[in-house]
Amino acid sequence: MIEMQDVWKQYPNGARALNGVSVHITKGEFVYVVGPSGAGKSTFIKLMYREERPTKGHIFVNGFNIDRLKDRKVPLLRRSIGVVFQDFKLLPRLTAYENVAFALEVIGTSKRQIKRRVADALNWVGLSDKADMLPSQLSGGEQQRVAVARALVNNPAVIIADEPTGNLDPETSWDVMKLFQRINDRGTTIVMATHNKDIVNTMRKRVIAIEGGQIVRDEQKGMYGYED
């Protein structure tokens, strides 16, 4: 499903983000990626959906060889991956429905399919009644639910989440995490970078800890292991 083989990443300014990382994530796993700020978590996540390229090493995601993937084939990779961000990244002038539909329009999905699949995705996240609202009319938690619906609408094999509860209050964070658990229960692989130790320590999943660009811990049902 996801495999990194001796992956290194150095940026043009000389900063080294990852140092020889190797990891294997199987289909259906739920994995937290934790570590202190600047440890390399975001780079680790971005490499999976080809936002960044490795300096050295090999990465395989859903059968795609990331380090050799031509730019024109990146959209094919991203159709099999849903990405959820801390700051939602919704288009402010589009309604909730239109934000989710946009993910299908860009790949040429028929209008009939878009209507059905967007309705299903919004229903899944409990926002059928907010479909016509703009992001500015929604709470932070509702905006993140729209972002989750957008990530789901292509029925991806993998969802990658980068600090998805970082801008949410504790109660709303738990509501969003329950969504991710439901998504995982239906067989979708989830890889989530997070600083939320309460969630990690309560919803016990596999924990990959990164420090100084290296994996220092990889535990099933692990704990967060860092102090704020």
Image (tube, grey):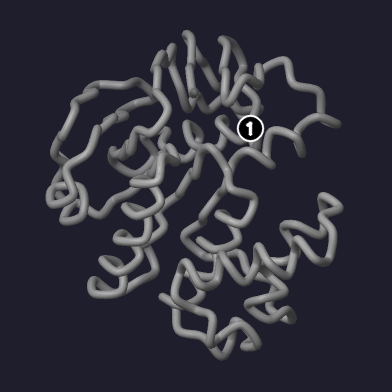
Above-or-below relation of 112 to 189: below
217 or 98, which is in the foreground? Answer: 98
* Residue drawn 51% across the image and 38% down it: 158
Q: Quadrant of residue 135?
A: bottom right
Above-or-below relation of 9 to 82: above
* Residue drawn 30% across the image and 61% down it: 178
| Amino acid type, mark 1 | Glu
Q: Position of residue 117 (x, y in %)?
A: 65, 62
Above-or-below relation of 150 to 53: below
Q: Quadrant of residue 115?
A: bottom right
* Residue drawn 48% across the image and 16% down it: 4
User: In the picture provided, is 42 more to the left or to the right than 121?
Assistant: left
Q: Position of residue 193 (x, y in %)?
A: 38, 44
Above-or-below relation of 16 to 224: above
Assess disc 1: are there few (<14), some (14-19) or many (≥20) residues with their C-alpha within 10 Å of its C-alpha. some
162 or 41, which is in the foreground? Answer: 162
